[in-house]
């Protein structure tokens, strides 16, 4: 798995603080931005996040290039609707020698690994045979969810906080959890205050919404029921 933060809004913490301050200020956003120092911006940002006043975080965005992940992962990823995606197409790019992700449970079990690799080779051969007879867009129906894919995605900061809450959780599936943790590491490096309290609900609020499925990391389990 490879995740690269390929671009992000310049000075994201100052931008968010300036947008939020505008709500309470007679002067314009550019003037606020010109006068704002980083420490003031950080303190203001902490206050906003603590109060759950999160809409100003929608003004800054982060774009990631993700590679070497499965289509199992990308299927879960696109459920996060408040983001934009561009993914390698199996209609236009042939998958004759497709790479595939091997789950740790398979990797750590020699007998399972043998079956897994053998069946992937069978699928690859059947795909190539079919792709010689019919369009790639139809031959791809044979391909497994393990197929490696790549995509670019852009999240605003508020949506990223929500993504981390869901996917850094111990209950999230291992592959997307690994990606979420790596994405969190990347954005923390460029916006440390904005993401200092980001992560699974137990990390952020000390509570868990997973009910009986909770991993048990925190005792405070909250349900609506
Ligand atoms: C551990 C785990 C298990 C899961 N299991 C399943 C499963 O078995 N089956 C399954 O289908 N999914 C499952 N999911 C996916 C989950 O239900 C969400 O679809 C996914 O996490 C995206 O979350 P989201 O809707 O908050 O994100 P986004 O789509 O990015 O939305 C962000 C927020 O915007 C608001 N929003 C977005 N769209 C709407 C809308 N149309 N109406 C109102 N408010 C909106 C909501 O407040 C939402 O929280 C699972 C997720 C996790 C983490």
Image (tube, rainbow, N blue to C red):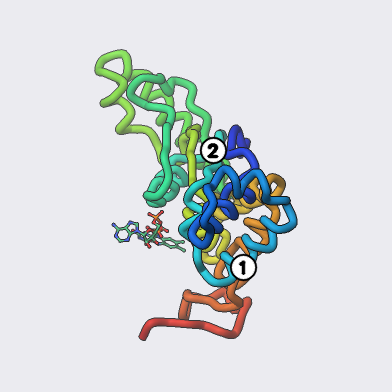
| Earlier residue among tags 2 and 1 | 1
SS class of the residue under badge 2?
strand
SS class of the residue under badge 1?
helix
- Give percent across and percent down for residue 42: 69, 58
Residue toward you, 34 or 204? 34
The Cα atoms of the two marked residues, 2 and 1, are separated by: 26 Å
Residue toward you, 195 or 68? 195
Q: Which mark is residue 47?
A: 1
Residue 13 visible, this orientation: yes
Q: Quadrant of residue 10?
A: top right
Who's the residue at 57% across and 60% down the image? 168
- Give percent across and percent down for residue 5: 61, 37
Residue toward you, 175 or 14? 14
Residue 105 visible, this orientation: no
Who's the residue at 62% across and 53% down the image? 181
Quadrant placement of the N terminus? top right
Who's the residue at 62% across and 68% down the image? 47
- Give percent across and percent down for residue 140: 33, 28
Quadrant placement of the C terminus? bottom left
Who's the residue at 40% across and 20% down the image? 93
Which tag is nearer the camera, tag 2 or tag 1? 1
Residue beneath label 2, please? 63
Q: Quadrant of residue 67?
A: top right
Q: How many marks?
A: 2
Disc 2 residue crowd, few under 14, some 14–19, many 20+, Cα 10 Å: many
Residue 22, placed above or below residue 68: below
Answer left or right for 19 relative to 142: right
Q: From this viewpoint, which residue is outermost toward the top?
A: 132
């Amino acid at each position: 798995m490879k995740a690269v933060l390929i671009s992000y809004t310049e000075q994201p913490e100052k931008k968010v603080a300036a947008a939020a301050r505008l709500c309470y200020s007679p002067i314009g956003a550019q003037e606020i931005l010109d006068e704002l120092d980083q420490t003031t911006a950080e303190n203001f940002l902490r206050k906003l996040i603590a109060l759950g006043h999160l809409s100003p975080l929608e003004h800054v965005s982060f774009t990631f290039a993700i590679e070497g992940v499965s289509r199992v992962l990308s299927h879960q990823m696109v459920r996060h609707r408040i983001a934009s995606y561009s993914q390698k197409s199996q209609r236009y790019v042939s998958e004759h020698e497709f790479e595939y992700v091997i789950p740790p449970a398979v990797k750590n079990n020699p007998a399972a690994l043998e079956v897994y690799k053998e069946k992937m080779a069978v699928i690859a051969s059947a795909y190539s045979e079919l792709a010689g007879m019919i369009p790639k867009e139809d031959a791809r129906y044979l391909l497994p969810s393990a197929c490696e894919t790549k995509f670019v995605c852009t999240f605003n900061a508020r949506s990223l906080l929500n993504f981390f809450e869901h996917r850094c959780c111990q209950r999230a599936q291992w592959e997307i959890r690994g990606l979420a943790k790596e994405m969190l590491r990347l954005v923390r490096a460029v916006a440390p205050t904005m993401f200092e309290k980001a992560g699974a609900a137990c990390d952020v609020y000390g509570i868990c919404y997973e009910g009986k499925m909770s991993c048990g990391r925190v005792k405070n389990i909250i349900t609506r029921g």
